[in-house]
Image (cartoon, helix red, strand yellow):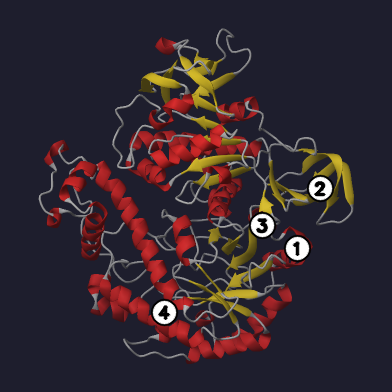
Amino acid sequence: MNTLLDGKKITIGTCYYPEHWPETMWQDDLERMKRTGIEVIRVGEFSWNLTEPVEGTYVYDFWDEFLDLCSRIEMKVIFCTPTATPPAWLTEKYPEVLNAKRDGSLIYHGERCHVNHNNIVFRQKTELITEHLASHFGSHPSIIGWQIDNEINCETDEFYSESDDLAFRNWVQNKYESLDALNAAWGTRFWNQTYSSFVEVHIPRQTNHNVGNPHQNLDYRRFVSDSARSYIKLQSDIIRKYLKEGDFITTNGMFNLDNHSMNKESLDFFTYDSYPDFAFDEYYETRGARDLLDRNWSKNLSEVRSISEPFGIMEQQSGAGGWTTRMRMPTPRPGQIRLWTMQSIAHGAEYVSYFRWRTATVGTEIYWHGILDYSNRDNRRKREVEQVCSEVKKLSRICGSRYAAKVAVIKTWDNEWDAQCDNWHKMLEDISQKGIYAAATRSHTPLDYVFLGPETSAEDLGKYDLLIFPHAVVVTQMEAMILERYVKNGGRLLLGCRAGLKTSEGHITMDDLPGVFKQMAGCVVTEFTPEAPDEENIYVIKPGDNGQKFRMHAQGFFDQFEVTSETAQVKGVYDSTYIKDEPALVKNVYGEGRVYCFGSTFPEDTAAGLLKMLGVSNPYEQYLDLPEECELAVRTDGTYTWLFVLNYDKSEASLDIKEEMLDVLNGGSVHGTYKLPAYGVAVFEI
């Protein structure tokens, strides 16, 4: 058990940059934090020069003085490795460490995250700075944990330097071992791309349309993920040698790499950077009337929960946001800091750290505001943080509990990356991922995300009444077998269009779709088409019913099914055009469970209809009735259950409490009408 996520209390922290302020301000800052209720600070993620001002010269005076002050004031510290911003002396002397764009142009010193993770010099310099920091500060009593790097792959997840080119070639050779295997996997006979030597193999490079080979592109995404994981593990292995008992190692942010594997191999738990105010940035008008806005960050938090439960928030928004060159987010309205903090806690966070204590007066992020403004005076936002620090003490009983969902969306990293490489696949995911989450949260149906991996078992999945794999385009035999066992054991699986289309190499199967799911699905796809641009809306209805029983929008793509099993039934057909009356929804009894194949995507109205049809929508309606504007998030320890109700609207919400429950934040029992103010939060215990 680490000292931060100890299962006993929720801890509040903040990000602090002593290097930005005169030493005369440090003590006052720390003491004000303590009075506010802040117990932990994160420091050092952009400060390589403070320890190594010139190559090979290591000095510790700055951090020694600051950490000793923290010890005297009893402020706990998360110390960071500073590798996201290497110093100018390094990139000037060793330009080979720089990252490059696809066209070969270099990314220079002057911002952050401008290096590549495969260059041997940069990895050596990383080893040295990490070793010096960990060996010198690892035993310091104020330090309780370490953050590796900062938001790895945040500014870019594309790397095209010469070092990456060489590393990719080695990665490919290690994976395939022979040219025959490589050529087969990448389908190189198409357009005469066959390789006769591994020397000819490169990372994806500039082409006429920058399309390249789709199978190579899929491997490239895996390679970029593996490179980041290797770089994090390089540092984790060093820090682990000097870690005090109870101290931890983590990193922050989700940026298109296999965070699940990285967490297992290198970290003690995962942390996320939550900025819901992005919903109100300069692109607000493009989002549409039904966009979830800041509520959509609950989807992100649910994906974080799939990596690590409980987890931490290393950066929680506390002010307006933006750089001098891009991004404009308004100041959080009264109540929104509290709302967004409770949003994180409701979804599994047991540490929340605000970015940042005081807003920077220099640099690119002078408009990325913290708790305090430039003037350093107390303000409304600080008072709201004080309120949160006081209130979370009332939530200590939820620590160690788990999120309570009976419905989960299945994902895999290969399928995620394929959608980034395949425009046909991407279109499907764009509709369905947004639609399913919107339908679940607006119907007050708690939802998990499950990423299938080598350690996933059918027993792990057995706690869910329904699994939804929206578009299982890239799927392996092993993944299909896990889902098959889940269904045989009594589970229910809902598949959308294009299921079973590709192998792990991205090859299209020549088997009837849904390919590896065919036997358990009890049907095959006889014909399919993307939606034509001049198509009228097509709906799925009950056979012979004319839409009286249900009417669900089919959007983007249409699979047409033929039943192949006596245990399968057509439950829905298309209602118009040349596919009228063709099967669109098939239910098959398989073992003790059920498989449902839906021939299209899942826009919100369709997903909502299916959740209701399958009996999993709004599972807590016996306890309370909520307006659509409010989110319901649920945590349980097996004995007690906590219902978080979050009002994202700028108007008061009226709740109907149907059974007497404990009002955790305000005390006392509640029943009947309950008024929740704009941006308000209530926590009920049952």
Label 1's element? helix
Which badge, 3 or 1, is on the more N-terminal residue?
3
Whole-number angstrom distance, CA of label 1 to CA of label 2? 16 Å
Query: Which structural element holds mark 2?
Result: loop
Q: In the rendered image, which residue does mark 4 sit on?
A: 130
User: Can I make out residue 334 in this image?
Assistant: yes
Residue at disc 3, secondary structure: helix
User: In front of the other: label 2 or label 3?
Assistant: 2
Badge 3 local density, few (<14 within 10 Å), some, or many (20+)? many
* Residue 552 percent coordinates (x, y): 55, 21
Q: Which residue is mark 3?
A: 345
Residue at the image position 31 percent from the left and 39 percent from the top = 506
Label 3, label 4: how far apart the Cα atoms are: 32 Å
Amino acid type, residue under disc 4 in the picture? Thr
| Disc 3 + disc 1, Cβ < 8 Å | no
Q: Does the CB distance between marks 3 and 4 fall below 8 Å?
A: no
Residue type at mark 3 is Ile
Say if 657 sits above or below 351 in the image.
Answer: above
Q: Which mark is residue 686?
A: 2
